[in-house]
Image (cartoon, rainbow, N blue to C red):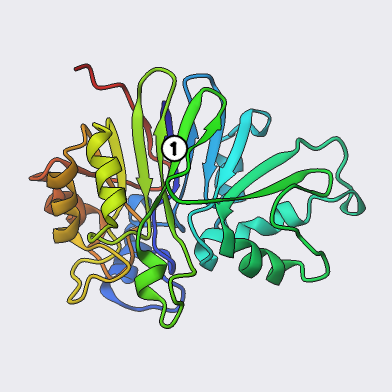
Amino acid sequence: MEVRILGSGGSEGIPAFLCQCHICAEARQRGGREIRQNACAHVTLASGLGILLDMPPQFKMAWDRYHLDQEKLAAILITHRHQDHTLGLKYLIDAVPKNGFRQAKTMTVYFPADVLTGRIRQMDPTNDYPPEGRQGPFVEFIPIAAYREITLGSCRVTPLETNHLRQHDEGNQGGSETFGYLFEDSDGTRMAYMVDAQTDLPDRTVEVLSESRLDCLIFECTFERLDSPIGHTDIQGLMRIGRRFSPRALIATHISHQNLGHRDLVKALAGEGIRVAYDGMRMKVRHRQL
């Protein structure tokens, strides 16, 4: 399995537009790995098939920059409805014959159900998207449920609830979901991608991750420090995640300008053996031999 981090930033990105904090100012000056676009990633399975995780507004720029192959893209997985993870869905909504599309590859998108009623309907309110089944000639939207495994080629994928929306959104009454995803590939590799996740994960998610003997865990580290860790994770919380699940490799991503800059975050996490993602990061994930 191979993972390409297309974006490693939080919702504002780094540098945040209009922000003059020292993290954003240093990022503008230093450039390179200090610059972060909204979090998203591409996974290449052992079979050669690709899976895209989230569609932030700048995903297409990263997709073209790294010459990813859309003909091998098996599916798109959306974590939750927030705009920094879904505004790129516009490119799918636009994939219709009236916009000049011809012989386009039909794409399947899996997502929590409220993405359908929220983000997709807001983008194209003139179309009546049913809860499942093909939507037009090129896109198929399929709602999924937490802990119900789906199969993509020879890879098993399990959505894992992260508690981001259920506890973070006021008055949502438990109707909103945010998913991380566990991948179990045909060669035995196990990798989990968890953004917009808090340290206090649901019991079932903890159980699944603990039993998985992860080769790689890509987990968010949005903030340097949180007084009330609701909806996200900070540096100390990420360290606790590493100790709890003991993945072979732990990668920090979804990093906001309310965290340390890249160089300083690398130093802060090095003692725990935690690597820090950066835009364009490419890594091989190999199966842990027992």
Q: Where is residue 186 shown, x and y percent of the image?
A: 44, 19
Q: Given the current orientation, which residue lies at the most extreme right position?
A: 98
Picture residue at 38% right of the left edge, 45% below the top:
193
Q: Where is residue 69 shown, x and y percent of the image?
A: 62, 31
Front residue of 153 and 25: 153
Q: Given the current orientation, which residue lies at the most extreme left position?
A: 271
Q: Amino acid at mark 1?
A: Arg
Instruction: Find numbered disc 1 in the image and state the secondary structure of the residue it sits on.
Output: strand
Q: Given the current orientation, which residue lies at the most extreme bottom position?
A: 171
Which quadrant of the rendered structure holds the N terminus? Answer: top left
Picture residue at 19% right of the left edge, 50% below the top:
241
Picture residue at 64% right of the left edge, 62% below the top:
116
Q: Is residue 148 visible to us here?
A: yes
Front residue of 41 and 119: 119
143 to the left or right of 266: right
Q: Is residue 57 visible to us here?
A: no
- Specify the quadrant of the image occupied by residue 199: bottom left
Q: Where is residue 123 shown, x and y percent of the image?
A: 71, 68
Which quadrant of the rendered structure holds the C terminus? Answer: top left
- Above or below, 41 relative to 175: above
Q: Where is residue 239 shown, x and y percent of the image?
A: 14, 52
Q: Count the labels in the image.
A: 1
Q: Mark 1 sits on what residue?
A: 4
